[in-house]
Every structure is written in C-alpha cells, then in structure tokens.
Amino acid sequence: MERTTRRHLERVGIALTGLFAVVMMLFLALEWLQEYPYAGTLYDQYTVAGMWLDYYLGTSVFGYSFMLRSIATGVLVGIAAPLVGTYLVHREMALIGETLAHTAFAGVAIGLLFSATTDWDGSLLAAALVVAVIGALLVQFLSERTNTYGDVPIAIMLTGSFAVGTLIISYGRGGFSGVSIEDYLFGSAAVIPAEGARLVAILTVAVVAVVAITYKQLLFITFDEQAARVARLNVTWYNTLLIVMTAVVVVGAMQIMGVILVAAMLVIPVAAASQVAHGFRETLSLSILFGQLSVLGGFGFAISQGLPPGGSIVVVAIAIYGLAILASSRSGNAISMH
Amino acid sequence: MEHVTFSYGETVAIRDVSLTIEAGDFLGLVGPNGSGKTTLLHLMLGLHSPDSGRIELFGQPVDEFDQGGRIGYVSQKATSRGGTMPVTVREAVTMGRFAHAGHSRLTDDDREIVDDSLETVGITDLSDRRINELSGGQRQRAYIARALASEADLLALDEPTVGVDAESRDAFYKLLDSLNDAGITIVLIEHDIGVVTDRADRVACINTELFHHGDTESFVESDALEQAYGSTGQVVHHHH
C-alpha cells in the first residue's frame, strides 16, 4: 500500500515537472516568435505573471525575461542531466561529464579565437557543442582501445582540453571582447542568451526522445554489458550514443552551472535517487525529481542571497543527497552489505 | 568450432581447439585457473574473434549470428554490477525480452513470459526486491530466469556458483538438470570437477589445448585431468 502511494506521488511529480517544462519551453518559443502577432501578446503575459510573482515574494527578478529564460534553462537541464546521468553513474562514468565540460570550455575558447581572427560570427555555444561532441567521440575511442572505462583517458582529456582552452584564452587576452570567461567557468544566471536557451530546449527534447526510444538498450548495457553483447545489441553504438548525449547535455548545463560544477547535475541527483529507489525506473523518476528540486531550490537560494545559481544548485542537491542517505538508512532497505 | 586459436598479444590462450556441441548437450568445461575456459566460452559466443579457425553458432558463422535471444549468458562479472545498481529482480529478468522487442514497447506476452520465467526458477515472491538484496543463490536464479525469458536454446554459464552456499548450489544444479531435460543446451564452466562429473553428460577439459572432449564416463577414466592440470594446479574434488 505504501509502495503504491509512493509510486503515485512519483507519477504526479513527474507529470508536474513535465508540465512545468512545457510551460517554460513555450516561453522560450514565444520569446523567439515575439515579433509575430499573438505571440508577442502571450509572451508579455509571462513577464506580467513574473511581476505578480515579484510582487507577492517581495523580489524583483521574475519580471525580467532574462531571469525567466535562465529559470527555463535550469528547469530543462534539471530534466536532461539526471536522465543521462542515471546511466552514466551506474556505468561508473560519473566524471565523464566533468571531462566533457572542460572540452566544451576548450570549444568556447576556440570559438572566441575563430571569431576574433576570422569573419566567423557563429555562436560560441555551437563551437562548444561541436568540440564537446568530438571530445566525447575521442574519449569513447580511447576507452575502446584501452578496453576499459578506466579513468586515465578521462583524466588526460579533462586536463588536456582545459590546458588548450586556457592557452588560447591567454593568447587572445585583450583581443577577445565582450565575453567573461568567469561566466563560463562558474555559470551565471544573467548571461544566458536567448539562442543558448533555445538550444537547451531543442537538445532537451532530443535527449528525452532518444532515451525514451533506447531506454531498454541503455539499461541492458549499463547493467550487464557482456550479456548485452551476447544478446547481439550493438553495444559500441549505444555507448557512443550515450556519451554524445552527455556532451550535448553538458554544453546546455554549462551555461547555468559553469564548467567546473556541471558534473554535479549529472551525478548528485542520481546518487540521491539510487539511495532510496527500489528499481531502475524509479531511480530515473526520482533523479529527475531531485534534479528539479535542486534547480528550483538553488535558484531560490541564489536569488534570495544574490549569489550565483551554479553553486547554489549544487549545495541544494547535496542537501537532498544527505536527506536521501538518512531516509535510506532509517528504512534500512537500500544500503546493501554485500 | 574448428581449429580455433586465440592469443592475447603474445600469450596464446587457446591453441587449435576443435569442438562441437550438439543440441541438448550438457557440457562441462573444466581446466585449471588461467587455462582459457572463459576465453573459449567468449569465443563460442562471439565476444572475441579468433586469430584463426572457424566458429559457428547454430550453424551460422558467429560474427554473422544475429539471433541474440537464443543465447542466455551468465558471466562471472554479471553479479558484480548487480551489487550496486538499483534494479529490481523483475527488471533484470525483463532484460531477457529486450533482444526480441528491439525498440518497440514490451507487450503483454513479454510480461507473461517474464512471469513464467520467475516462476520456473522459484523467485516470483522476490520479483519487486532490488537484486542486490538477494543472496548469491537467489541472484543466480534471477540470471537464469533472464536467460529463460529470452527463450534461449543455449545457456552459457561461467562459474555461476562462486560464493553460493552449498545447499543453494545443489538446488541450482537441480534446476539446470531440469532445464537440460526440457531440451535446453547447457555449457557450464565450473572449477568443481565433482559437480561436472555428477551433472554434465559431456566434458571438455582444456588447458590452452583441448585435452579431452567426450562423455563423462570416458573423461573420468582418462588421464586428461592430470595432463591438463599437470603439476601446476590442484584438482578440486568435492564429494556429493
């Protein structure tokens, strides 16, 4: 009985999260289309609603579209990151996110260099995305070659790409204007450009769709890779898919969380969920719920204290993790003594 | 498999092994530690490609074989990941249907097959438990149930009872016997020679090379065991 109630609550939570995500995605879509009739009017309703929220909470943030955009990005990242992270954590690849974030940082630097020295006027995020995906494929290649997901290729990629990034930025110091490297390193609620938020929306929809389609295969290779190979699943292909999805999520999450903290969203909600969940499906649901709570709680804390959201989100996530450990040791059913 | 040779770098793991397993066999694969038993099994299943020689699975070259559902495989490592990952017994057994379902949704038929498999190995009452809460013996049953759910014709087991208490082990081997009687081919790697001579009807004894392949009686009478183990290893004998 208790279990059905719990399952019911989880379903309601996931449904609410989904609904909220759709509302925020609609905001991003309207922002994009605001020059068209109706869209502009609807778009204004969001800021009006934000102002009312400000009025009731005594804040002055929600009435600004850049803030709503950041929250929308956070909400979407809070879905996509734990979703992919659940597979990564249980494949013992928790730090791959950190590595790809550093690769993405190198991508930002390369993008800056390109736009400073050539006529190229593309988005830095697109550059980050391309470089992170290349980095992901490279890590995958290295780990296939060394026949293990040892952390050596990961450590080399992590430091190597960060080294390249810092070299390029030092080289171009003074020449790169208008971009604060700190915002990329530590994340910021204020810098997320409209196209960055739209990119996150598109990528989130893509990631959720891919996981929905390949849920079974990803679960099988995560749980028992050899048996999955024997069952003639194309393990290399699914591994590649997973790591490319990670790169995609990391580039999206990097804007809010910052390069250094991005792995937290992939790992901490999953760790908390794994403490209390009974099965894998429940772990997925709880990871997303915990991720969402961390994002919203983190934003709340950041706004009320005037601090950056990245660190706040991580601290809230860790608080949830702590509670999950307490809950599981009390009920005594999740920690095994094997 | 015919004249199969396989090396890890410079080290030859399997040399010129030829071996045929007939449908319905219960083959025990024995040999000292590091003799290449697991490697041989991996070669049969297509997890490694041989350096030379030919391997066929169900009459098809192994690298073209695509009916993954026909093989149920329980690796030595299978139990380790199950030790930490939050997966219910039912979820683990349902994985046996994945090769059949592909990207489409699981049907009621799939769920029924999973229920039947859980019942066959006698763990229906544990189906909602996390697999890491089970004892070693129960966990092995869950893996067998997964193989049954895939409707496998061939069960490949790599030392399935390491860390399982004697009583559950006996029950486990009885279960294998009854599955074999039902027509499922079984290939079993086992360090306990006693179990193999008790249960299997054919034995392959290897130490890089194949020392014996035939029925159990002729294996017991032959000196293959001494040859294979040489002076390097200790033969494990258990009395049942």
Image (spheres, coloured by chain):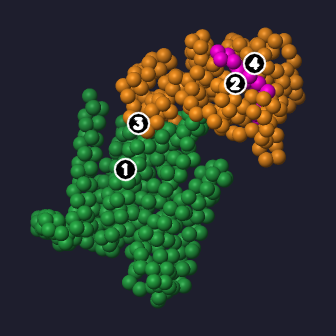
Q: Position of residue B154 (x, y in %)?
A: 61, 23
Residue type, mark 1 in image? Val
* Residue under disc 4 on the same chain as residue under disc 2: yes
Quadrant location of residue B46? top right
**Mark-to-mark CA distance, 4 and 1:** 49 Å
**Mark-to-mark CA distance, 2 and 1:** 43 Å
The residue indicated by pointer 1 is A208
- Look at the image and give the colour of chain B: orange
The residue indicated by pointer 3 is B104
Disc on res. A274: none
Q: Nearer the viewer, residue A278 or A74?
A: A74
Q: Which class describes the residues within 10 Å of circle 3: few (<14), some (14-19), or many (20+)?
A: few
The residue indicated by pointer 2 is B190
- Look at the image and give the colour of chain A: green
Q: Nearer the viewer, residue A41 or B14?
A: A41
Quadrant location of residue B16? top right
Range drawn in magenta:
B18-36
**Mark-to-mark CA distance, 4 and 2:** 11 Å
Mark 4 or 3, nearer chain start: 3
**Mark-to-mark CA distance, 3 and 2:** 37 Å
Whether tag 4 and tag 2 are in contact, CB under 8 A, the answer is no
